[in-house]
Image (cartoon, rainbow, N blue to C red):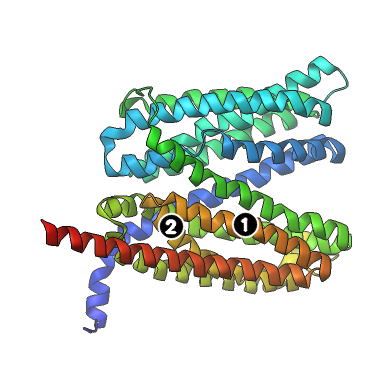
Amino acid sequence: MKKLNAAQIIGGLPRLLPMIMSYAASSGSLLIANAAQLVTFAILARSFGAVEFGVFVSVTAVTSIAVHLCGLGASECLVRRVARDHAMYPVMMGHNLILTLTSGVVLVLLGIAILPFWMKLSPDPVENVIAILLILITNVILVRIILLTEQIFIGHSQFAAANRSVVGFAFARTAAAALACLVFGVTSLVDWAIWQFTAHVLVLIAYMWSLRKLGRPQYRIVREEIRLGILFATPFIFRAIRQNVDLLMLGIMANPEVVGSYGVVRRIVDSSYLSIDAMNRLVYPGLARLSVDGIHNAIGRTKKILLAALGIGIGSALAIFIIAPFLPILFGSEYVSLVSFCRILSGTVVFVAIWSVAVDALGAAGYHGPRAAILNTANALGAGLIAWATWVAPPLGTFISIYVIEIAIMIAAWLVLLRLARNSRIAAQERSFTT
């Protein structure tokens, strides 16, 4: 194997600079958006008070699941199909709008039929229904359509525009919360529902205007994409369930300090995944183009991406491990378990980085069935494993079960990817012999 000397490595740096800058912009936009979201929640929490904010969190939890159902996962084809052929954008956009609006209306109707009996935002029944309706429309339909903007720009490889859409949306929500709560003194979820709805409508208008040059949607259903979209969406639902069962069980089995420390650590570790997501969103269109004639054509690029992801994952894990002793300064000395919990869970970032590369390669190649089978099975069984392990030995059982799940996903994802790549390569060779 040919070795590279220092001069060759330095000479190759200019070619890597655009990729490095793109990754920095991508990860930076996600981190800024995440920080803005934290500021928004802080403003609302201080303005609403504990009781009202608790209701807000409950409603948000419900709509965060519903928003993954809205559109039936059709947004993925805006990246995969459009990245391969930009001329497909009008059809894919029309396909998305039809499925988003249709499924969104169904979800909103189901929500408005159920939630008013469960959640009371106002003692006035009519006002309560109207507030819940506005929240459902905003957090399910409007959010899903607004998020399409990022996917559309990524599909067209316009990453700077995609980054601006992410940051702009986050800042718009923060500005709305600051204006409503800090300037106009909004202290109730009923009043916030109006402000939130208005802010999202304005963002939607601005974002749809920014897409006007890409072409008008062609409203028709692409039938073969419905099944792929559903398979793409289901892992997010199962993952949301798995990500909440540990907190639920710890709340039953452990003391408040353990639950609080674990909740803070989970937020920090989840935020560290943004650096991995930032890279994956950059390479996804390229993998989609390479795999159009078979996933084996993208396996070489995927292995190179794996090395980068491994470096990012190890770096993120080390950063969490190093900053752990300083966290009580920010969150308070009463969180005595915070440092140890943070260091124990920091290693999970590495395994997530490894399996996310394989999972994204499967998705980019259109193998949503195997992708969904891996993630759905792991998350469904993992939820049960975490619940049982936490019940038996909290919180040690929780930590062990999390590592078992992430390692199992890593092994399964790469075994499936390599097997499909081998089968694809054999099939391509057989076709070349017969022609």
Q: Which residue in the rendered view is the most extreme toward the left?
A: 435
Give the residue displayed 58% in from the left and 60% down from the top: 272
Give the residue displayed 50% in from the left and 30% down from the top: 145
Q: In x, y percent, where is residue 378? A: 60, 60
**What residue is disc 2 on?**
279
Assign the C terminus to one quadrant of the image: bottom left
Q: Which residue is more in the foreground, 57 or 371?
A: 371
Q: In x, y percent, where is residue 364? A: 38, 51
Q: Which residue in the rendered view is the most extreme toward the front?
A: 434
What amino acid type should be assigned to the residue bearing mark 1? Asn
374 relative to 82 in the view: left or right = right
Q: In x, y percent, where is residue 31? A: 55, 52
Label 2 neighbourhood size at 10 Å, few (<14), some (14-19), many (20+)? many
**Quadrant hosting residue 24:** bottom left
169 relative to 21 in the view: left or right = right
Picture disc at residue 408: none
**Quadrant hosting residue 33:** top right
Q: Earlier in the sequence, mark 1 or mark 2?
A: 2
Image position of 16 with respect to 85: above or below: below
Assign the N terminus to one quadrant of the image: bottom left
Single out the mark in the foreground, 1 or 2: 1
